[in-house]
Image (spheres, coloured by chain):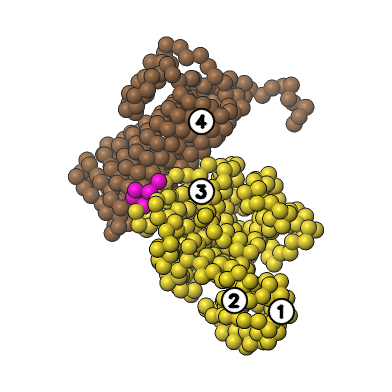
Amino acid sequence: MKTIDLSSASVRDLNQALHGDVQDREWVVTHPAGKHNLAVGVNQAVSIDINGHAGYYCAGMNQKASVTVHGNVGVGVAENMMSGTVRVKGSASQAAGATAHGGLLVIEGDAGARCGISMKGVDIVVGGSIGHMSCFMAQAGRLVVCGDAGDALGDSLYETRIYVRGEVKSLGSDCIEKEMRAEHLEELQELLNRAGFDADPASFKRYGSARTLYNFKVDNASAY
Amino acid sequence: MCGIVGLYLKKPELEGQLGKLFEPMLEAMTDRGPDSAGFAIYGDEVADGWVKLTLQAIEADYGWKHLMGALEGRLGCSLDWFQNASAAVLKVNCEEERARAALADLAPEVRIMSAGQSIEILKGMGLPKEISERFGLGKMKGSHIIGHTRMATESAVTMEGSHPFSTGADLCLVHNGSLSNHFRLRQELKRQGISFETENDTEVAAGYLTWRLQQGDSLKEALDKSLEDLDGFFTFAIGTRNGFAVIRDPIACKPAILAETDDYVAMASEYQALASLPGIENAKVWEPEPATMYIWERA
């Protein structure tokens, strides 16, 4: 196990070590003190424990690594993640998992506004609630919310499937509630299992795209 | 981009440490705002009937002693003052308007940064570390404080353009964001009799709150209305004589984080500014909701 103490080492020291010829499979980061860009761009199957709160873009562009933050994270955690797992034991700020293509992002607490904005294949599972405009223009992947969702959930949504257990304040343009069929209960159970949450899939509702924004409506031509 | 920070102490026995606790918070936001910085500190309250004014001159060696002598003669009432770098804190036993009129007459070049019974606003251009050292922030005492580090986007880098902006007696505001309707709002507020010293968009927000409070709104009502009338992005921290408030616009584009323990409430643009506070590991830490007001006040 390799420990990097950010009260003495710099964030660049940490990220360069993680990008180099990595011998250790287990890494521990101490005294993160809300610093930005921790463990970004890692593309090796290592496990990284960040012991404390992280700032912006923690574990961004992650591939293969398994990152656990034992605290809260700032804006854009796991932004553009490709694969691997990022787990936040606390809460996340805005734009969690933005544009991420793959992997699993688990937030045990709440996530702020625009969670999963423009997600492109990532799975995001949130133990608490999410803020407004979440899943805005999302294109692929799954978002699971055990708590509530804020205003305009799934605005201008393409293909992402959204499961919410609590209250949805309002749905965004082209986002509708959809039937929960057997395959969805199964998919949701599998996601909850992977995230380690004990929740009954039958208590969730499913939301998705009405798919009316895909094509230009000729009736609107006069407006342009 | 800008950084805003606030620290409100719940226990009077901690007041001697306010500046020491706050200094690293302000400096931690240097990356968000390296061109100017400032803070409004509350404490050292004057008795009823007195008013405390923070004055600032352009020159570091301004002749404060001469001005204060002339002022005492003009006002004919008790007066106490001390100099702090380019600023002077004046305490005078008369109405605020009389003191303002006398100052405008005797020293039109001196700017009045704040007025009230408790507030002192100190600000200037330069790195936050330079500003805190210039004014001796680390040694200051008080009950609460809000601060700002500026990266100018809407107006020039000047001492006047740096925050906090005073919005009335013992009231001030710091802003992270930008207002899109400040030009028109400024014209409307001017017609209502509000005067402005800079082209800064935040001064318009401060002027707006001043106007609402003059109309008889409570702080809460004024902030509620600001959500309707101010267009743009903002996270505001507002200092009052006995408390402080945080509010974000409905889009909540600009960051904010709050932390609370039995000893204090702290807010910042980023967690980094809170990391130096004692007991932060076990504090309740959360992100304030959009269009929601958070207010802490002493009884």
At label 4, counting other C-alpha atoms closer than 10 Å, the crowd grade (few under 14, some 14-19, many 20 or more) is: many
Residue B153 can be seen, yes or no: yes
Q: Which chain is yellow?
A: B
Which one of the lettered chains is coloured brown?
A
Query: Are the numbered discs 3 and 1 placed on the same chain, yes or no?
Result: yes
Which residue corresponds to mark 4? A149
Residue at figure coordinates x 65%, y 58% from the top left: B206
Q: Residue at x 80, y 58 (%)?
A: B191
Q: Chain of mark 1?
A: B
Which residue, given by chain and number where applicable, does mark 2 sit on? B91
Q: Which badge, 2 or 3, comes first in the chain's sequence?
A: 2
**Residue B103 x %, y %:** 69, 78
Residue at which label 1 appears? B102
Q: Examine the image and state in which quarter residue B173 appears.
A: bottom right
Q: Secondary structure at mark 4?
A: loop
Quadrant of the image containing the N terminus of chain B: bottom right
Query: Depth check: A140 or B124 in front?
Result: B124
Closer to the eye: label 4 or 3:
4
Relative image position of residue B160 (x, y in whole percent): 63, 68
Chain at numbered mark 2: B
- Does B182 sit left or right of A164 as displayed? right
Q: Are marks 2 and 1 on the same chain?
A: yes
Residue B163, above or below B112: above
Which residue corresponds to mark 3? B255
- Residue extent of the magenta highlight: B280-284
User: Where B14 sits versus B221, above or below?
Assistant: below
Task: Kindly report which numbered mark, 3 or 1, lies closer to the viewer in this rendering.
Answer: 1
